[in-house]
Image (tube, rainbow, N blue to C red):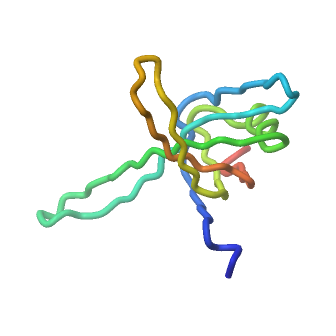
Amino acid sequence: MSTIRNKVQLIGNVGKEPEIVNLDSGKKLAKFSVATNENYKNGNGERITDTQWHNIIAWGKTAELVEKYVGKGKEVGIEGKLTNRSWDDKDGNKRYITEIVCNELLLLGQK
C-alpha cells in the first residue's frame, strides 16, 4: 500500500508546447500543462463540461521524451506524484503552485 500514498494518474490533452529547460548540471526539465474534462448533466438536463488544468513537470529521460514527442493538443497519459512548492515573486509576494512530477508518460492517440 505504500506505493499508492501519493500517486496521480491522468489522461488529458496538452495545453501548449512544453517548455524545455537545460540546466547547468546537465539535467533536462520539461514543464507543460494538461487539461482533463469531466462531462455531466446539470439539474436542467444540460450537458456541462468541466475542464481542470494540471501543471506537469518531468525530469531526465522523461523530459527528453516530452521534448521529442509531446506537443500542444496531444493526448497523453501521466503517472506521477503531487508536489507543492512556494517562492517569493519579484514584488516579495509569496506564491504557491501544485504540480505533478511525471515519472511515466504514455503517448496516446499517436499515429
Residue, far right: 26
How far across and how far down the image is residue 78, in percent? Answer: 65, 54
x 33%, y 52%: residue: 50
Position of 32 with respect to 47 (left or right) is right
Q: Quadrant of residue 43?
A: bottom left
- Choose top left, top right, bottom left or bottom right for residue 44: bottom left
Q: Residue at x 80, y 32 (%)?
A: 28
User: What residue appears at the point 60 percent right and 43 percent down from the top-left corner?
Assistant: 56
Residue ID at (71%, 45%): 110
Q: Position of residue 15 (x, y in %)?
A: 52, 35
Front position in the image: 57 or 90: 90
Name above or below for residue 55 compared with residue 104.
above
Where, by quadrant of the figure, is residue 29 drawn? top right
Q: Is residue 83 above or below residue 86?
A: below
For the N terminus, give its image quadrant: bottom right
Q: Nearer the viewer, residue 3 or 73?
A: 3
Q: Residue furthest front?
A: 92
Residue 11, horizontal then vertical, whole percent = 57, 55
Residue at the extreme left of the image, as rendered: 44
What residue occupies the far bottom of the structure in this picture?
1
Image coordinates of residue 22 in percent, x first then y, are 79, 24
